[in-house]
Image: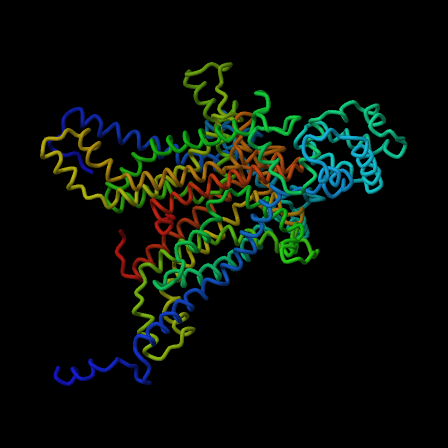
Amino acid sequence: MALPTYATPLERLWYYAFRVICVLIFIFLIAPVLVVIPLSFNAEPYFTFTPKMLALDPEGYSLRWYDALLTLGMPAPDGVRDSAWWAQAWETSTWIRAAKNSIIIGFWSTILATVLGTLAALGLSRPEMPYRRLIMAILISPMIVPIIIIATGLFFFYSNPCAPLAIVGIEAQCGRLTSTYLGVILAHATLGIPFVIITVTATLSGFDQSLTRAAASLGANPRVTFFKVILPLILPGVISGALFAFVTSFDEVVAVLFIAGPEQQTIPRQMWNGIREAISPAILAVATILVIISILLLATVELLRRRSERLRGVSPH
Amino acid sequence: MADTAPIAAAPLTTADGRPLAEALVAAQARSRRRAFLLVVPLLLFMILSFILPIGQMLHRSIYHDGFSSNAPGVSAWFAANPQGTEPDEAAFAALVEDLRTMQANRTAGEAGTRINYVLPESRSLFTKAAREAKDLQPPYREALLALDPKWGDPVLWEAMRASASPYTFDFYIVATDFERAGDGSIVRVTENRQIYVYLFIKTFLLSGLITLICLVIGFPVAHLLATLPMAKANLLMILVLLPFWTSLLVRTTSWMALLQGEGVINDLLVWIGAISQEGRLRMINNQTGTIIVMTHILLPFMILPLYSVMRVIPPSYARAARSLGATSWTTFRRIYLPQTLPGIGAGALLVFILAVGYYITPALVGGADGQLISNLIDFHMDKSNWSLAAALSAMLLVGVLVLYWLYDRLIGIDNLKLG
């Protein structure tokens, strides 16, 4: 967007003003993400830059909030940091337990969402798929329906999953799903499915269907065709979808608030506690770690997107 | 060519002798079935984990058996006597009998809660009367009235009549700021109790405002990204995508650090002398906080659709307009802006839909006046007013689904893109 030679002085002024406005908007976008990083090294329990930090005095910075993350919830946080101490931290530290829960729940819900979502996307991208539009609308809706409605629905449903059988006249009481890992995993898989569907159908839209016919004509059955021809080509899209699903689960707090018990406390749930009750800069330390994770995830997805475009022979844009 | 003419005259068949048209229909049906079978597992999963739970929850908004199941006697009397009948001694006797059963089963609270929805502060009336019920002597009308004159209130009897059937629209009446009067008619509640409609309107207005701000600040950025060379645009795109990938709670937390009274922005403003130490701005735990943080969180949802539309607008149109004598403003207004409309529609609808149902951000930074309808649903869930929460959810859901349908009509769900 170079300035044309026939531009009037006013247009020249606007051209530079426009750039300045855009820079300001970019600062608005990115500053809140980055500001937590230096703040998390604050030596004082404040949420702002202390004079010592601004003077770049090393005394103004410390790792105390990262240390606080480790020791919170430990019965005996003081003492020598030997292997026994670390073993204790691994078992009892509140944040480490939350991280473990987040990873377990994120992992299984991602697997579930990706497998079911990829299969469905394969069906949806076939031109002969009946009721395509309606089914697509249903599958994307968890992204659109307000999370509070999904969470309250699941809260009632999970307290007695057999209750809907009353429609067919069976009054049954079966096990609860509230306060179970399975319950949270199923809920998070539901929330992740739209992202898998969107990314995988987008990848499949550039997929050359004659390749599957070629495979079939050469004697491959549908299973072999899928694993040898389709999957390698759409894998970047599937992995992107899986990453989206994982991030959705990793960041989800409302469903966890409604249906999880004390055993299933995740990182966002713990942050929610931290923000609502005793807010301490330890939250900023967690936030910093999460920002670094999201930078890594974004880099991965970008690389996958470019690889996928190369594989399918689509030039970038 | 001469060989094919006689074959064309006979009906076409496949190698095994079936008519071709028939075989083709069968093959197409088979491939439709195959495509559908691939979707079936996920569809079943979604019905179980999404549609059924929401449907069951919505059922609660029209079903509440707290009174009808615990007060069978009075319910039977209501069924036998038409609306407007003055409650006679038989009605009071049935009521006292029901109260005695409630006391034995400890369900007076349940029944009272149901009445409480329609007539606030009547729960204690039931629990108290149930405690005394076994000592009451006929005539029961006088006995109950001696206990509390409210028992003679026709509004209370109307509320009980309405609650005698488990199926009811009472929760929708409450959720739209109406109530039942003594003669069974439905009237608006007094002005100071009209909270639900007000909050719905406020939610939609705030969402509209946030959408507008997102459009105003997203448009220039999308335009810049769309007109820069690819390599530069990709680099700057990271600045849009990074917030998109960052945890919502992280972004909310950092906004708290930035906006609070002793936070970074106020410190900066004091330092440059724009405001005094006492004049620190209140930018969080109020409506301003909700607007700022939600704008930041939803901005990528505006920029991405705008960008994908602007990217493919050929720059030659604008150049042609300029060469024909249009000023740069006219070129923008008459040539460029109309071509970006699909992007504006997609981005604005998406941001609006997501904003209407927002919960986390208002709950954390909204304070008292920055709460949205989702937060009120949560409040009623917390207070175990489940049916009312369900009615409010149903109304919100209908609003969102209408917008979703509109999105599908105008833009098409297939065109939803992420990054």
Please provide percent x and percent y for residue B199. Answer: 52, 29
Instruction: Tell me how the rendering is colored.
Output: rainbow
Q: Which residue: 18% across, 37% down?
A: A2
Residue B99 visible? The answer is yes
Q: Nearer the viewer, residue B166 or A120?
A: B166
Q: Nearer the viewer, residue B169 or A197?
A: B169
Q: Quadrant of the N terminus of chain A?
A: top left
Q: Which residue: 55% across, 43% down?
A: A149
Above-or-below relation of B273 to B218: above
Q: Which residue: 21% across, 25% down?
A: A13
Above-or-below relation of A123 to B253: below
Q: Nearer the viewer, residue B316 or B16?
A: B16
The picture quadrant where one finds residue A280 is top right
Q: Which residue: 37% across, 41% down?
A: B240
Please provide percent x and percent y for residue A230. Answer: 37, 67
B326 sits left or right of A56 in the view: left
Residue A83 visible? The answer is no
The picture quadrant where one finds residue B182 is top right
B383 sits left or right of B358 in the view: right
Count how many numbered circles sit on residues in the image: 0
Q: Nearer the viewer, residue B382 or A107?
A: B382
Please provide percent x and percent y for residue A275. Answer: 58, 34
